[in-house]
Amino acid sequence: VRGVLHWVAQHAAARAEFRLLDRLFADPDPEAGGRDVLDGVDPDSLQVRHGWVEPHVAEADPDARWQFERQGYFWRDPVDGRGERLVFTRIVTLKDRRKEGPTAHEADPSRPASSARPPAGKPGDAPDPLTGLSDPQLVAVRRLEGAGVPRADAARIVPDDASLALFDAAHATGRATPDGLAGWLVNELPRALDGAPLREAHLRPDALAELVALVEADTISGTVAKELLAELVQRGGDPAAIVRERSLSKLDDDATLDATVDRVLDAHPDEVRAYLDGKSGLIGFFVGQVMRATGGRADPKAARASAERRIAARR
């Protein structure tokens, strides 16, 4: 078979995680037929693989862009991939899977056979996140970096005194990882605040730490966590207690999940027939309906597997 074998010497290679991002929607027209666009989200738009990279990749500038052969362009994840961890997130694919589908000769990052090289152009073209910071702020950024916070996140936290104080107090509880705390503070908290000043929020540092810990322990889904964060900002409270009182933990009962899927399928017979006739993109619609029916408690991959299995049983 004609092809190219990409490999690295395993004894010298560095372990790495690869996050393969693809199109968010399984259907090219997720709003067709008046559907809610959120129902078309493809739960498989993120695939996580583990494998190896050459040692010089681990030692390079973390902001460098890399082309992993037959996979696309990647960079070290700004939230989870800095410090000692090697986590690479794909930023550009080489092929449009929706049009062409996966090729039989695509490299599999889970094998110890990865070759990487920087893409054309100067690596590290991203703007320096430290530009414009004062000397005391630079010292604070280095302190957060030393604790495990990615530089880009640290540079966004430090200039705001309220954000820095919230991070330091939450980190001091020891309940959640520093990079996890920083990621939620930088990416999700602004949405929950919705323009309101952080100083006026009812969110306590220990509550933020507990919320992130629940996510990191896989006790609650990201969807539930985001909704809960907005409530903590508005009214405060104890995340763990709220999760217990409202039964918000992830749904891990297969029988209950299958029953929910059956109810969704019964409610959408036309979509079931269309799926059976070959419109496979509708699987995202079914998963979205299951997620909505379970209040975000179902695992998207488990919901997809259940939907595929239950639909197949209706042929």
Image (tube, grey):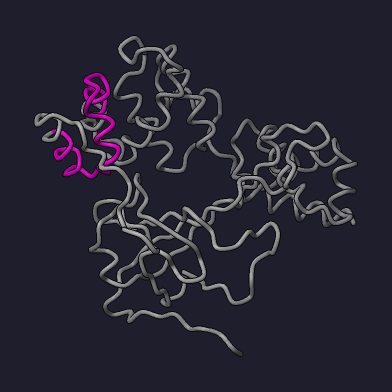
In this rendering, would 51 be left or right of 275? left
Asked where in the image residue 216 lies, by quadrant, the reply is top left
Query: Quadrant where the C terminus lies?
Result: bottom right
In this rendering, would 22 be left or right of 81? right
Residue lying furthest top in this view? 200
User: Please, is residue 33 above or below residue 16 in the view?
Assistant: above
- Residue 42 x/y as whole percent: 65, 47
- Frontmost residue, 294 versus 122: 122
Q: Main secondary structure of the magenta part?
A: helix
Residue lying furthest front in this view? 121
- Residue 3 x/y as whole percent: 55, 85
The residue positioned 66% from the left and 33% from the top of the image is 294
User: What span is in magenta?
Assistant: 140-167
- Frontmost residue, 16 versus 24: 24
The residue positioned 40% from the left and 25% from the top of the image is 189
The residue positioned 32% from the left and 35% from the top of the image is 181
Q: Is residue 298 magenta?
A: no
The residue positioned 43% from the left and 11% from the top of the image is 235
Query: Quadrant where the N terminus lies?
Result: bottom right
User: Please, is residue 250 above or below residue 158 in the view?
Assistant: below
In this rendering, would 43 be left or right of 82? right
- Residue 128 x/y as whole percent: 25, 42
Asked where in the image residue 31 lies, by quadrant, the reply is top right
- Residue 136 x/y as whole percent: 10, 29
Q: Is residue 165 magenta?
A: yes
